[in-house]
């Protein structure tokens, strides 16, 4: 269990409405995580304080006074609505898909127009590279740099490079060493 899940299920944990497995997981997480343990302690202390507050006693005619005040506010609200015409309620209504599509098309059109106007009056310059002058011919590649040798190196076949080096040794030197 992680802290996010602990916080999400904490109300049910305090109310003891979770399953046994979830209760054990919550208790285990609370014992391992100091911040979640502090949260649990703060919430439980606040609930303890709220439960121990003395009950509020209402005055004798509280209900009647509350009802008269609510009636006055309703009457003021009706008068305000009538003075503003036939507006019953102003609620926010989400836009339709067509309205969103029209707004998106307008934004794209404005961006395209801005990009077009931004590039007007400027001539495109051709990219010109500096000339390349060869001064020396390229040297012959080494026989050790052939694709066969390069491919054999990473595979761990150590015989191939030795064979190619042996091919480069003059034969007369090899025959002199062998005694022939």
Image (cartoon, grey):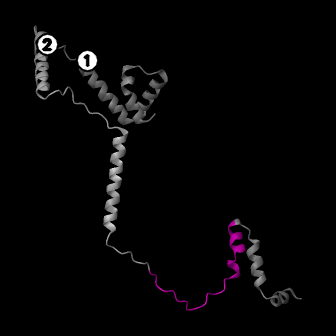
Query: Which residue sits furthest right?
Result: 180
In the image, taking residue 61 as reference, residue 9 lies left or right, namely right
Q: Report which residue position mark 1 lands on.
A: 51
Contact, CB < 8 Å: mark 2 with mark 1? Answer: no
Q: Position of residue 32 (x, y in %)?
A: 42, 34
> Which element type, helix, strand or loop, lies under badge 2?
helix
Q: Give the magenta-colored segment's residue range.
A: 128-154
Q: Residue 171: name its quadrant.
A: bottom right
- Drawn side of residue 84 relative to residue 119, left or right: left
Q: Nearer the viewer, residue 142 or 173?
A: 142
* Mark 2 → mark 1, Cα distance in angstroms: 28 Å
- Numbered mark located on residue 176 in the image: none
Q: Is residue 31 above or below residue 114?
A: above
Which element type, helix, strand or loop, lies under badge 1?
Answer: helix
| Residue 133, placed above or below residue 42 | below
Q: In this figure, which residue is indicated by the disc labeled 2?
A: 67
The extreme top residue here reads: 60
Q: Residue at x 36, y 75 (%)?
A: 123
Give percent across and percent down for residue 2. 43, 36
**Residue 86 sits in which quadrant?**
top left
> Is residue 53 found inside the magenta-colored segment of the image?
no
Residue 153 on the magenta segment: yes
> Disc 2 or disc 1, which is closer to the eye?
2
């Amino acid at each position: 269990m992680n802290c996010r899940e602990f916080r999400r299920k904490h109300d049910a944990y305090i109310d003891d409405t979770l399953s046994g497995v979830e209760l054990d997981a919550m208790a285990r997480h609370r014992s391992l995580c100091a911040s979640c343990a502090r949260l649990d302690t703060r919430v439980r202390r606040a609930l303890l304080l709220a439960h121990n507050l003395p009950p509020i006693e209402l005055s004798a005619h509280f209900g009647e006074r509350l009802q008269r005040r609510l009636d006055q506010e309703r009457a003021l609200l009706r008068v305000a609505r009538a003075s503003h015409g036939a507006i019953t309620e102003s609620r926010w209504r989400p836009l339709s898909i067509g309205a969103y599509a029209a707004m998106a098309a307008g934004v794209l059109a404005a961006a395209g127009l801005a990009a077009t106007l931004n590039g007007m009056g400027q001539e495109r310059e051709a990219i010109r590279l500096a000339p390349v002058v060869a001064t020396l011919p390229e040297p012959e590649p080494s026989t050790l740099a052939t694709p066969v040798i390069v491919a054999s190196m990473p595979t761990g076949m150590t015989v191939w490079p030795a064979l190619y080096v042996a091919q480069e040794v003059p034969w007369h030197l090899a025959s002199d060493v062998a005694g022939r």
